[in-house]
Amino acid sequence: MAKVRLEDIKRRFNNVTAIEDISFEIPDGEFWVLVGPSGCGKSTILRTIAGLETATSGKLFIGDRLVNNVPARQRDVAMVFQNYALYPHMTVAQNIGFGLQMRKIDPKIVQDRVVNVARSLSLDHLLDRKPKQLSGGQQQRVALGRAIARQPQVFLLDEPLSNLDAQLRDDTRAELKQLHQSLGITTIYVTHDQVEAMTLADQIVVLNRGKIQQIGDPKTIYQSPANQMVATFLGSPPMNILPAIYKNHGFDISGQFLTLPPEMQDNLQLPPGQSVDLGIRPEHIYINESQRHGELTEEALGELLVEVKVVEPLGRETLIRANVPNSTVLLNVQLGGDVHLRPGDRLSLQLDLHQLFVFDPNNGNRILP
């Protein structure tokens, strides 16, 4: 096991910069997740750590060893890919033990390790089967087992669950978390799925266009996003963004006005007429007293009149999409499961203004809080 440190890593492909100014340090034994939209540089970072890509500039350390010029096979890392990459002519046991055999490990040690790994992944009854006789989830566990059996210093996982169906993805995600807790191996996990990021990570690295947007634990990233990209990427349903104009100690949203509480007015230094983007999460919007989470004074609430466009009953909760009149803005609202609404209904929504974010529409940076 080892810490991993990146210092100002850049990777260019001809005239295209895939990643730039990537710097972070993963302490020994932690589980970090790289998350972001497609093409943001997640896999490039992972492949650079693995040695499958060469950094154009910067320094990469595994433990205390500089590994920029160390071949992939000598870095003591194990990588699990999106496709399982199993040998179809080998059994499960042979696939799990293949890496050990190539390193000429004692056959008795190989056998013991294969059995132990298979047992931990609930594959011990499948050791004699070939990959074509396994389900997708079982094949993915074999790929994980092959990596675990090597006992590397670092695990690198590149979207390993994306080929699985929803239920199997949830089950395998829980297994991954349990495995990390028992093995304690430094793990770097790449995904575009923000649910995987939030549930698995000790720390999340949010990327966009090849640059780091924010690093933090899941709670911090969710509650205190650095900018609008982070705010809207993490959270399901995503944070609502409302274009507005600042005036008279409040915000004009398509002709409707939100007056800010006094303490928020004191913290917001904007010139009258300034355009802003307001952000608020769906769970901080209510339609009546009974749905408020906690005690909120009237001055902490803002009112918006909307028209319901889409209703999505999910049992325990109901999601609606509502249009702000005279605009193209659609609000996602998360309500209780006992709410009965239909498209076309007009509602008066109450926004918890203490949960309001203010972003600069020009660069997406957070202005408040």
Image (cartoon, rainbow, N blue to C red):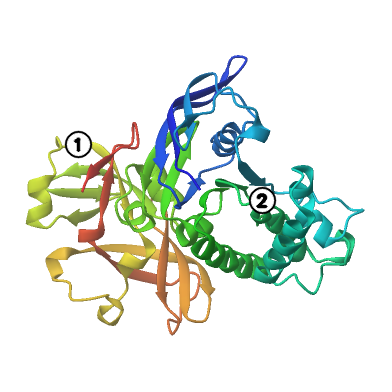
Residue 137 lies in quadrant = bottom right
Q: Nearer the viewer, residue 77 or 130?
A: 77
Q: Secondary structure at mark 1?
A: loop
Q: What residue is drawn where x is 17% and y is 72%?
A: 296
Camera sees residue 237: no
Q: Nearer the viewer, residue 19 or 321?
A: 19
Percent across and percent down for residue 202 are 41, 55
Q: Secondary structure at mark 2?
A: loop
Q: What residue is drawn where x is 89% and y is 61%?
A: 132
Residue 218 lies in quadrant = bottom left
Farthest right residue? 89
Camera sees residue 80: yes
Q: What residue is drawn where x is 27% and y is 50%?
A: 357
Farthest bottom residue? 338
Percent across and percent down for residue 40 are 54, 36
Identify the mark nearer the N-term, 2 or 1. Answer: 2
Q: Pointer 2: residues within 10 angstroms few (<14), some, or many (20+)?
A: many
Instruction: Please name the amino acid that badge 1 sits on.
Output: Gly
Q: Which mark is residue 150?
A: 2
Q: What residue is drawn where x is 51% and y is 48%?
A: 1
Percent across and percent down for residue 308 are 45, 67
Q: Pointer 1: residues within 10 angstroms few (<14), some, or many (20+)?
A: few
Q: Quick check: 335 left or right of 298?
A: right
* Distance Cα–Cα, label 2 vs label 1: 61 Å
The number of numbered badges drawn on the structure is: 2
Q: Which mark is residue 273?
A: 1
Q: Is residue 300 above or below residue 71?
A: below
Instruction: Please name the amino acid that badge 2 sits on.
Output: Arg
Q: Nearer the viewer, residue 344 or 76?
A: 76
- Residues tagged 2 and 1 counted as in contact (Cβ below 8 A): no
